[in-house]
Image (cartoon, rainbow, N blue to C red):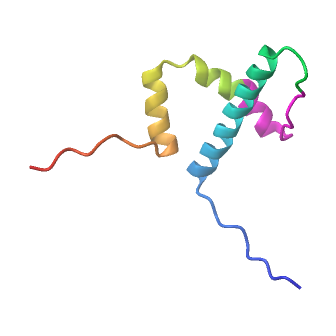
C-alpha cells in the first residue's frame, strides 16, 4: 500500500496565474487550428464554468487591454518581475 502525501498548497495568485496561462495557451491553439488547412483536431478542454469564463470572457478581455495596463496587471496578479534593481554606488 502506497502512502501518498497531500498535494502542496498553491497560493491563490499562483493558481490564478496557472489557470490564466492555460486559457491563453488554449486560445493560441485555437487560433493555430483555425489557420491550419486540414488535419487538425480540436484539443481537449477542461470542462466547467471557470474554464468557460476564462476562455470566453477573460482572454478576449485581456487581449483588448492596452499594453501598459496589461503589464501592471501582470505585475500585480502574477508576481511578474518588476525590472532591474537600481545600481549600487
Q: Position of residue 23 (x, y in %)?
A: 71, 34
Tell me if residue 63 comes above or below residue 75 in the rendering: above
Residue 54: say if magenta: yes
Q: Over which residues does the magenta segment extend? A: 41-56
Q: Position of residue 9 (x, y in %)?
A: 64, 64
Q: Seen from this angle, which residue lies furthest bottom?
A: 1
Q: Is residue 32 left or right of residue 77?
A: right
Which residue appears at 68% of the width and 43% of the height? 19
Residue 27: say if magenta: no
Q: Seen from this angle, which residue lies furthest left?
A: 89
Q: Is residue 57 left or right of residue 38?
A: left
Q: Position of residue 53 (x, y in %)?
A: 75, 31
Q: Position of residue 13 (x, y in %)?
A: 56, 49
Tell me if residue 3 comes above or below residue 84 in the rendering: below
Which residue appears at 59% of the width and 25% of the height? 62
Which residue appears at 88% of the width and 29% of the height? 42
Amino acid at each position: 500500500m502506497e502512502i501518498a502525501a497531500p498535494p502542496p498548497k498553491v497560493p491563490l495568485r499562483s493558481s490564478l496565474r496557472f489557470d490564466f496561462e492555460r486559457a491563453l495557451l488554449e486560445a493560441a491553439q485555437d487560433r493555430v487550428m483555425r489557420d491550419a488547412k486540414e488535419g487538425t483536431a480540436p484539443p481537449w478542454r477542461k470542462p466547467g464554468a471557470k474554464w468557460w469564463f476564462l476562455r470566453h470572457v477573460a482572454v478576449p478581455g485581456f487581449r483588448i487591454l492596452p499594453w501598459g495596463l496589461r503589464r501592471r496587471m501582470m505585475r500585480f496578479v502574477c508576481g511578474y518581475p518588476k525590472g532591474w534593481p537600481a545600481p549600487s554606488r
